[in-house]
Amino acid sequence: MRNSRILSMVLVFSLILTLLVGCGTKSGDANGGGEDSKPKIAYYAYNTEPYIDLDPSVEYSNGIITLHNIYETLTRYDDETQKVEPLLAESWEANEDGTKWTFKIRQDVKFHDGALLNAEAVKKSIDRTIEMNMGAAYIWDAVKEIKVVDEYTLEFHLKYSAPIDLIASAAYAAFIMSPNVVDKDSGWFNEGNEAGTGPYMIQKVTKGERVILTRFDEYWKGWKENQYDRVVIKKIGESTSRRQLIEKGDAQITASLSTSDVNALKENTNVNVIEAPSWKNVIGFFNTEKAPLDNEDFRKALSYAFPYEDVVENVRENQALQSYGLIPPGLWGHDETLHQYKFDLDKAKEYLDKSGVKLDELSLILTFTSGNEDHRNSAQLYQVNLRKLGIDLDIREMNWDNVWEKSKSKNPQDRQDILFMYWWPDFPSPISWLMSLVHSEEAILFNLSYIKDEKLDQMIKEGDQLSATDRDKAEELFVQVQKEILERAYQMPIYDDKTVWVTTKNFKGFKSNPSYEGVVFFYDTYYEE
Amino acid sequence: MLSKLVSIETLKPKLKEMRFLLYLLQKNKLTKLALYVAVGLFLVALLAPFIVPYASHIRDEANPSNKLLPPSKEFFFGTDELGRDVFSRVLYGTRISLNTAVLSVGLALLIGVPLGAIAGTIGGWIDEVIMRITDIFLSFPPLLLAIAIVSVMGPSLQNTMLAIALSWWPWYTRLVRGQAISLKERKFIQAAEAIGTSSYKIIFGHIVPNTISPVIVQASMDMGGVILTIASLSFLGLGAKAPTPEWGLMISTSRNYFLNAWWYSVFPGLAIFVTVLVFNLLGDGFREILDPKTRKN
Amino acid sequence: MGSYIRKRLILGLIVLLGVVTITFTIARVIPSDPAAKWVGPRATQEQIQEARIELGLDKPLIVQFGVYLQNLIKGDLGYSLRTHQPVSKELAAFIPATLELVLLSFLFAVIIGVPLGIYSAKKKDRLLDHISRLFSIGAVSLPTFWVALFFQLIFYSRLGILPLGGRLSTEITVMFDIPEITGMILFDSAVTGQWEIFKDALMHMVLPCITIALYPIGLVARMTRSALLEVLNEDYITAARSYGLKENKVLWSYALKNTLGPTAIVLTLSLGYTLVNTFLVEAIYSWPGLGNYVATAVVTLDYPAIMGATIFSAICYVTLNIVADIIIALDPRVRL
C-alpha cells in the first residue's frame, strides 16, 4: 500500500522530468541559414502587434512594418540624401505653382494576384484611400482629381499647391494595390488577403501575434541568392525577452529595447547594435492659456529647470540628442543654430523672480501616456529639480485617451500644465510638426500648448505653399517659426530620439530609414555567414 | 482566497476570547513566527520614514549617475534606474502596501458590515435584495472587477483602494449577515425588541458591535490577498504611480532591467512574497484553531 | 432536487443580468469619448458626430443598454474601438490559447496538489506537514508575475532548456501548417498526429503552466489535507480502523474517495484566480491569449473589449459556480 503513494510521487516527478528532458533536445539552429533545402527565415522580434488593420488604406499604426514589405508606394524618401527617390513611379514633375503633378509609372510591375501595374491601378488605389477617409487619408487633402493620361502617365490636379512627391512617399495611406481588390472592404484584407506589388506575400497572419510572409517570386526587382525566403514578424512585448531572443540568435533583428538592454548588447560580439536617427522627438507642451504658464518668463524658468543632459545621458543613455528646435536631424528644416535651453537652475531662478509668479504651494500637473519608461524617468528628474525651485510637480501618468481628453477640457483651468508627447511625421516634411503642434486650431487636436499666434500662422501657411515649389525658401521660413517658438518658450523641445536596432551578425544589408518608423525593408537584407 | 472557501459561519469568537486565541495561535511555531513578523512589518510601516537609510530617495532625490548599482555596503539592495536606494524604497513600500491594504479593507468593511447587519436583522425582501447583489459582485472573477473599475476611472492608489473595496465588501456582508441571524435569536436582542428599541438602534447598537471580533479575524486573514491584489494592479499599471515606491510598480519598472540588475526585481518581489506569506500563515493559523472540525485533533 | 436546480439556474440568470448591468455602468463612467476614439485623432467634428450616431451613442442610456443586451443574446459584443473588429470574433481568436493554458495548469494542480495534500494529512503536525503547509501557503502567496520573470531568467536565459515565450517556435510556425480545429494547439496536433508540433507546443507551455498552476496547487493541497483530516475523524473511518484495516487501506479506499468532491469544487472555484493569473503572466510569456488581450485593451482604454472580456469571464465563473453548487446538492457527503 505504501507503494501506491510512492508510485504517485514517482509519476509526478517522471512527468516533470520527461518535460524537462524533452526540452533539452531543442533543435539547434533556428534561422536555418545553412542548408539549401530549408528556406531562409528572417525573424523580426517586434515590441507590439505586427499590425492593427491590414487594409492599406486604413492602417495608421505599427502595421506599416508589415505593409511596406507587401505593398509599395510611388516614391520613397531617402534620409541620407534628404531626397525623394523613385519606386513605383519612374519620374515626376510639377507645374510652376505646384498645383499639378505628372507621374510616370514604372512598367512591367506585377501585383501578387497577377494584375499589371498601370496608371489606372494607381488612381484606383489612391482614390480608394481618399474615399474611405480613414487613418492618414488626410495627407491627400490637397488632391482635387487624379487623371489617367495614358497607360503609364498620371496627373494629380490639386486644390492648392502641395508636395505630392513627398506625400506619395508617406509611411501611411500611400500604398498601391491591385485594381482587382480596390472594391474589397477592410474585412477582406483583415482575413489575411492582399494584392500588392511588394517583394513579399502574406503566408499567414495571426491577429495580435504574428505575421508570416513568403517571397513573391515575380517581384519586379528580381531575386538574388541569400535573400530571405520567409519573414516572420512576431510580437514580443518584453524588452528583456527580445534581447534574449537576439542573444540566442533565435531572432535576426529587433528594436525598442530598453537602454540597459542595449548597453549590455553593445558588449556582445555576436550582435550588431545600430544607432540610427529617428524622426521621433519628445516635446514638452506648456499650457500657455493657464496661469502661471501664461507668463513667458515663468515658461523660460521652467525651460531652464529641465535636466536635459541628465535625461539624454542617463535616462536615454545617449540614445538620443538634445533637440534644436522642433525638427529632428535628417529632415529638412532642422537647424543647429537654433537656441538650446541648457539646464541652469540659477538662470531658472532669475527668470522666476522676473516673472513675479508667487510660488506658495504651487503645484503643476504634468501628464504623459502611461507605460512610457523614458517619460516617467524624465518626469521624476524634472520633479526633483523643480522642487529645488520651490515648485511641486504632480506627475500624472495616464492612458493616452485620458491625457488627450484632459488636454481638451472646455475650461483651460481643467487642463494639464505641462504635457510630454512624442511626435513624428506622416510624410517627410517639417510641416507635420508646425501645422499640427503650432498652427492655431479651432478645435483642439495636437496644438497642446494652445498657441494662437497670427504671425506664426501666417509663416506656416506660407511655408506650406512654398514646400511644393521652393523648398529652400520654405525651409527658411520654418526655421524662423522655430526660433520664435523658442524665444517665447511656448514649447520645450527635449530630445530627438535615436532608433537603436540590434541584429545578428549574419543579417546583412539592413538600413534604417527614419521616415518609415520601425519598418525593415526585408528585400534589402540578406544572409551571410 | 483560501479563507473564503471554508465555512466562515463557524467562527464565533468573542472579544474576550481574543487573548485565548492569541495563546492558541502561538502554540503553532510557524504561526507564532508569522505573528511576530507581522507585528514587525507593521512597526516598519509605522516607522519607515525614520528608519530608512536614504529617506530622500523616496521622492526628493535622484542620482542618475549612481543608477543600477549592485548591492553593496552602501546600498544593501542596490540602486534603481534613477540611482535611488532600493533598500530604502522597499522598506518604505511596506508602509505603502500595508496602508493601502488596511484602508481598502476598512472601506470594504464600511460598506459590507452595515449591509450585512441590515440584511440579517431585518430579513425579508431587503435581505433577498442585498444578498442577490452580493451574488452579482461575487460572480466577477477576483481582480477582474477591480481591473475594470480602475481602468475606466484612471489609475491611482485611491482608485485602487476604491476598486478593491468595491470587489471585496460582499464577503463581509455575508459574514455579518450570518452572525446577525444567529444573534437575532439571542435573549438580549429579543428583549431589546420587546421594549420597542428601534431597529436602527438594534442593528448598530447591538448587532454590529457583537460581530466585530469575527469580522476582525476575517479582515486580518484577507490582508495577504489584498496586498497581492494591490501589487498585481500596480504591476499592470493600474495602481500606484511613480515615484511612489510601491512593490508591484517597482517590479513592473524593473522588467526593463532585470537581466542586468536582478536585485531591482528580486527584492521588491521578496518583500511582496514575505508579507503576503506572513498574513496567509496567520490566516491559516486562525482557521486551524477556529475550525471545530480540525480542532478536535 | 429538480426544483433546486431550476431555482439555481434562474438565480444564475439574474446574477448574470446583474453582471452585465454593472459592467455596462462601469463602461459608461468612462471619461473619454468612444466616438472620437473610433474615428481617430485627425477626425473632424462631423465625423465624430457621425460615429456617435453609428455607434448608437446618441440614444438615451437605457435604450443603449437595451440594445447592448439584445446584441449580447445574439453573441454580439460590439466593436473594438482600437481595431474596429467585432469583439466576439477577437475573443474567439484569443480564448483557445488561454483555455489550453488553464486546462493544463489544472492537470498540474491535480497531479501535484492532491498527493501533497494526502501526504500532509497523513503526517499531520510533523515536520513534513509543516514543510508542505509552508509550500502550499507559499504557492498562493507568490506574485505570479514575478515568478514568471524568474522562470524565464533561469530556464531560458541561464539554462537554455525551455523556450522564452510564445506558443510555438518560429521554425515550426513557418515550416508546418498548424492544424486549426479547436485552436488549442496541443489538442489539435495530437488529434492530427503531428507530434513535432505537439512537442514544440508542449515545451512552450511548461513555464506558463507551472507559473499559473502554483496557485491551484497550493489550494488543492490545502483543501485535500483539511478534507481528508475531516473524513478521518468520521465515525465510519474510526469503525474501519477498529476493524483492524490497515491505515493505508483506510486512507486510499475510504477516505480519499470522500475528499474528491470538495477538491473538485475547490478546483472549479480556483478557476477565477487562474484566469486572473493569466492576465498577469500572458504578456510576460508573449502568450496570445485572453489575458494579453485584456492587458492591451486596458492600456488603450478599449472599453467594448474590456467589457466583452469581463462578461465572458464572469459567465464562465458563474456557470462553474452553478455546477459546483449542483454537485454539492447532488452529493450529500460533500459539505463545504
Image: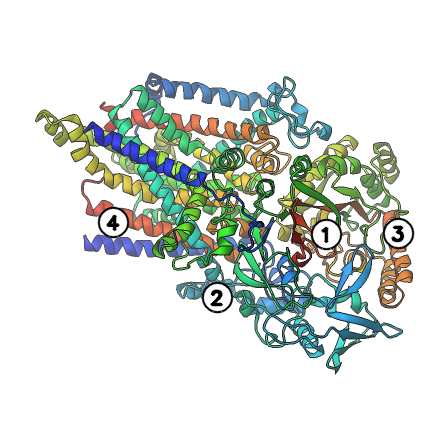
Instruction: Please name whichever residue, A310 or A403, is drawn nearer the observer in this view of the structure.
Output: A310
Name the residue tied to disc 4: C326
Q: Secondary structure at mark 1?
A: loop
For the point 47% across and 51% down, the residue is C289
Q: Chain of mark 2?
A: C
Q: Secondary structure at mark 2?
A: helix
Query: Alpha carbon of mark 1 to alpha carbon of mark 4: how far?
Result: 62 Å
CB-based contact (under 8 Å), mark 1 and mark 4? no
Closer mark to the observer between disc 3 and disc 2: 3
Residue highlighted by disc 2? C63
Point 8% across, 27% down: residue: C243
Q: CA distance from mark 1 to mark 2?
A: 52 Å
- In which quarter of the view is residue C203 placed? top left
Foreground: A436 or A168? A168
Q: Quadrant of residue A355?
A: top right
Q: Where is residue B172 shown, x and y percent of the image?
A: 38, 38
The kind of residue tagged 3 is Glu
Looking at the picture, how far across and down is residue A499, in whole percent?
A: 71, 47
Of A20 and C142, nearer the camera is: A20
Q: Nearer the viewer, mark 1 or mark 4?
A: 1
Q: Is residue A484 left or right of residue B14?
A: right
Residue C160 visible: yes
Discs 4 and 3 share one subunit: no
The residue carrying mark 1 is A512
> Which element type, helix, strand or loop, lies under badge 3?
helix
Mark 3 lies on residue: A484
